[in-house]
Each structure stands twice: as structure tokens, then as C-alpha cells.
Amino acid sequence: MPLLKVLILAIVQGLAELLPVSSSAHVVVAEKLMGLDPSAPAMTLLLVMLHTGTMFAVIVYFWSQWKRSYFVSANTFNRFAIRAIWATLLTAVIGYPLQKIIAKLAFPGAPKAQIEDLFGRLDLVAAALFVVGLLILWAGLKERNAVAKTTEAYDRSLTRTGENVTFGQAGWIGAVQGLSLPFRGFSRSGSTISAGLLVGATRERAERFSFALAVILTPAVVGRELLRLLKASHEATASGASLDLHNSIAFSLIGMVLSFFAGLAGLRWLSSWLESGKWYLFGIYCLVASGVVFYLHHIGY
């Protein structure tokens, strides 16, 4: 793959990953427009390595906030850890079986059906963008229209949970994160932060907790895609074909570094929009993007 294409995908991923507009949808569309196959093992590995770059951007950007919110005492950390484990468990319990079910329904009778084989379907990406756009719009308008009432609720919640989301809020965020896993276009950050807002979390808590979950989830996803690429490499070798494993890994590492810097820029933008009460505008963006992606599908991409 030409390095220029890796650079373009890294910038797209880094800027969009930490905004609630589905970086995966943007990367898939960019890959399609550049003539790449989003479902190929090398491309899905590149995508998760781009996610890894933005994961490090999340750690750098949120570290001071996490220290104040989650690491000020052993009790505070334990409360956060319990919520994070609970949310991640729900993500796994919902997301993993859902991926298997969707793959089996999409490819009936196929012995090696994988959810990644659907990642290049722009019609599915458009539908996912539309649904998450409605969710973000709903959460943003609800929060915008009930500032005084929710401020009182947040103040009461603050005495119970400190800087943590509640146990129930963590459960909803983790469950929605599980629903987002099989679908390119169903923004993980957009859906989880919106879920937090809808169940009464403050914007700041929902944002912090959502990105903390991303840091926990990303290594598992990277491991899965590495195994998938290694398996594809072995199968290619056995059939007499070739798959340049070293090149794929090298380009993925370069993309990871580039997406790290683009991710820092995206995070600053996201936080400023959250603080200014413009969350609902991301929902409008996703709805418009859904129409554009469906049009691209209609004309043959």
C-alpha cells in the first residue's frame, strides 16, 4: 500500500475517531474511494492500529483528568474499576455474540463467516450512521432543553459517586458499546456518551468514562485483528498465494503514530463542543453523512 494512502487514512481516522461521527465510517468510505478493500485482513489491522494511535492520544489528553477523578484515593479507584469492569463485561456479553449472530445471518452456511466481511458494505454503514445520528440528536436536544433540571440531578449524583458515573450509568454505557462493535458507522464514542447523557450522567463524566473504556477495549481488538492477519497469511502461504505480512504491520505502525497526533487535535475539538452544549450538531452531521454514504453506495462504491 502506498505510504500516501496510509497518511490519508491516519489523518481521517485520527480526526474522526474521537469525534462522535464514526471514524470507521469515514475510513471505510476513504478506503473505497481510494480503491482499497476495507474487509481485507491488512486493512482491518491498519484500522485497529489507527485506533491504537488514538488510544494513546486519549491517555495523554485525559490523564490529568483521570488522575483527579479516578486515582485520588484507593477507594475512588476501586469505585471506578468496579464500574469499568461491569461496563466492559456487558460490552463483551452483548458485542461478541452479536458479531457472531450477524455474521451467520449475513453468510448462511459459510463455515468461516466473519463480521469483518461486512465492513465494506456502504449501505450498512449508511444505516448505522443514521441510527447513531438519531441517538446523538436525541441526547443532545434533551440535554440542551433541560439544563437547570439536570444540573440539580448532577449535584445530587455528585454526592453519591464523586467523579464517577453511577453503577447503572456505567452499565448502560457498556451495553451500548457492545451494540456498537459489529457496525461500521455506529460511532462508539457517539453512542456511549449519548447513552450516558440520556441516563443522567454529566457530559464530563460520560466523556471521561467512555474514553477510559476505549483504552480498555482497544488492546483486545488489536489482538483479534493481529490473529486474523496471521491466519490469513498462513492460509495464503498454504494456497501458494502471498500476503506481505511485514509490510502490513510496518504500515500499520506508521499509521498508528500519525493517528496519535491527529487524535490529539480531534480531542481538543470534541471537548470544546461538549462544553459549549453543541452535542446535538454531531447528530445532524451523522444524518447528513448517512445520506452521502448511501448515495456513494447507490452509484457503485
Image (spheres, rainbow, N blue to C red):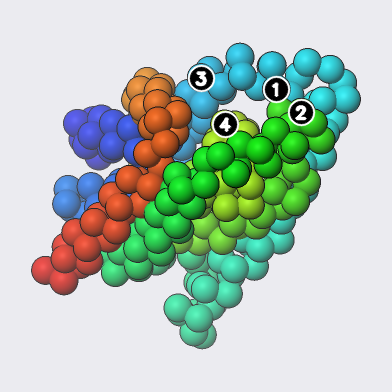
Q: Earlier in the sequence, mark 4 or mark 3?
A: 3
Residue 142, percent across and down? 48, 52
Residue 224, percent across and down? 57, 49
Q: Earlier in the sequence, mark 2 or mark 4?
A: 2
- Amino acid carrying mark 1 in the image: Ser
Task: Tell us which disc is closer to us: 3 or 2.
Answer: 2
Q: Earlier in the sequence, mark 1 or mark 3?
A: 3
Q: Is residue 221 left or right of residue 238?
A: right
Q: Earlier in the sequence, mark 3 or mark 2?
A: 3
Tell me whether the residue at label 4 lies in contact with that at label 3, contact meaning CB atoms closer than 8 angstroms. no
Q: Residues within 10 Å of mark 1 (few under 14, many from 20)?
A: some
- Amino acid carrying mark 4 in the image: Glu
Task: Tell us which disc is closer to us: 1 or 2.
Answer: 2
- Amino acid carrying mark 2 in the image: Gly
Which element is circle 2 on? loop
Q: Which residue is mark 2?
A: 162
Q: As drawn, which residue projects farthest toward the left? A: 299
Tell me whether the residue at label 3 lies in contact with that at label 2, contact meaning CB atoms closer than 8 angstroms. no
Which element is circle 4 on? helix
